[in-house]
Image (cartoon, coloured by chain):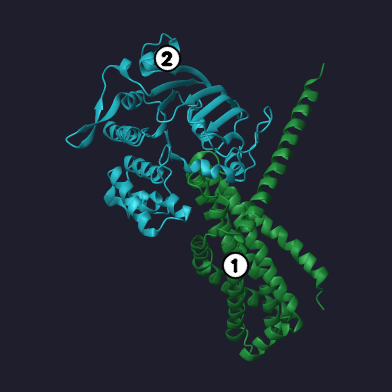
Chain colours: A cyan, B green
Amino acid sequence: MRETIRAVLGLTPRPVAIPPEPPSPGLRDPDEPIISFRDVHLAFDRPILQGVSFDLAPGTTKVILGGSGSGKTTILRLILGLLKPEGGSIRVDGADVGHLGEEDMRPVRLKIGMVFQEGALFDSLTVGENVGYRLVEDGNVSEAEIEARVREMLGFVGLETFYGRMPSELSGGQRRRVAFARALVARPQIMLYDEPTTGLDPITCRTITDLIVKVRDLDGVTSILVTHQLRDAFNVARTFMARENGEFTPKAVEDLSMLEGTEFMMLRQGVVEFKGTPHELQTSEDPYIKEFLS
Amino acid sequence: MASRTQLLILSLGRRFSQQVKESVLALQDYVVLTARGLAALVTPPNYRRELVTQMDSIGVQSLSIVVLTGMFTGMVLALQSAASLDAFGARPYVGRLVCISMVRELGPVLTALMVTGRVGSGMAAELGSMVVTQQIDALRVLGSDPVRKLVAPRLGAALIMVPLLTVISDTVGIFGGSLISIFNLKLSWEFYWRSVGNAMVINDLLMGFLKPLVFGLILSSVGCYMGLNTTGGTQGVGLSTTRSVVVASVTILSSDFFITKVLLILFPVV
């Protein structure tokens, strides 16, 4: 009920089943996954996640599919420490985020960029101020550098002329692209996308998925894409950036069995129903998956 | 086997205990939020720009309604008190009565209620909208503490501006009373203001300054709490806004009684 205020105040219940580990300094063995879920449980009025386990290697992409209320967004909120699990462990770049307080979560969050479902832009700030927010909060970056970085990021998402506009003047697709720029401005190691294409037209969806691919392939950023849009999920999996005449352009692989580096995971009522490659997903004989894909 | 009546009583008991538990938890959250907000006001980092913005929103933009309320309250008070005092041949005491009523009671309470309606509801609506559009989550993800960034500046601005607005309201109210006394009740300007000056003692000023401080804290903390506690989309924002006005108004009126009672015990009127 009082989820937001209790989370803001750090009054969310902590796991009782597992004794808390001391806050980790955030050092990770290079061979370890950058994100690791182990038997994670969470329930509010009903079970949300039931024994979810998965790993994500650095530089790879995980696409999380599932119907509404299956727990997809909850996974992202747990990674960011916006929610705490009731059982199990969650490690992000070596830090046990399930047991870190709000203050200790800050260095972990600095490594993560998040694109919220509707953008979640600050209404009272201009596009430029929204994108540069994290750098301003950091306090160690000069104003000139902030402006240069913000303009660079807006150029990356194709909105360089929108610097002084207010969020209310933007379309849905433009808001997502600004949110994209805001998430990328601090050059994160991990990008989380929460339904970034929901409610957008097919052309804008393509623009967004191309941006996801660009960040993945050109910057080597580890990504988690949460979506229920199968077309966009497969677009991200089969597209790669190719260099043509000195410029990078998106190209698509037609044969899904050739794909590497992108893993699909499907949730059903808080339980992992499927984990595997895009090809394995498409050829699965599981009746639920078949119905979901049809 | 339990009868239907016993089952009904059991179910009602369970529901009641659940409600009590919920209320105690809500009170705990409210106290923690207010304490954290006040602590954030006096510890770095501070969001000074945000504080100035809120001071403008709470203070400057509320000035017109506070002046109007104060003026008409003072005028009507002069009219009403003259009608009663005439029965005892005490019309010259109008200034004294207007002054004491405005400074001790009506100025602080009416100012706080007007600011609650205009600003407290706005705080709940603004923060509630930020909750439902995930802006609070975004703030946390981008490294900000929502209590420091959003709650503390609102508490600070209300603590500074509500007492100032009350002083303005008191002054304008007493001035409004003087207009009625001079032009309607045919009292002299000097007599009215001398009566006002003689009426005012240090206890009145203490009461007139302490109350708006407490009321400012109540209206801003309730607005922030209700806003951050919003659930259920845009409908929830509307509900939080209404709740914040109702809860803050009732709390202001009830705390007014207790503050008055305590201050009258500590500093009795001679």
> Residue B101, image x and y in percent?
69, 73
Nearest the eye: A135 or A198:
A135
Residue type at mark 1: give it: Ile
Badge 1 and badge 2 in a common chain: no
Q: For residue A245, which numbered disc appears in the image? A: none
The residue positioned 56% from the left and 45% from the top of the image is B239
Judging from the image, mark 2 belongs to the subunit labelled A
Q: Name the quadrant containing residue B215.
A: bottom right
- Tell me the quarter of the image containing the C terminus of chain A: top left
**Measuring 59% from the left and 73% from the top, which residue is drawn there?**
B169
Within 10 Å of disc 2 (Cα), the crowding (few <14, some 14-19, many 20+) is: some
As drawn, is A117 to the left or to the right of A83? Answer: left
Q: Which residue is pictured at 27% across the width and 51% down the height?
A: A161
Circles 1, 2 touching at the beta carbon (< 8 Å): no
Using residue A200 as the reference point, say whether residue A186 is left or right of it. right
Res. B83 visible in picture: no
Mark linked to residue B160: 1
Above or below, A270 relative to B125: above
Q: Quadrant of residue A14?
A: top right
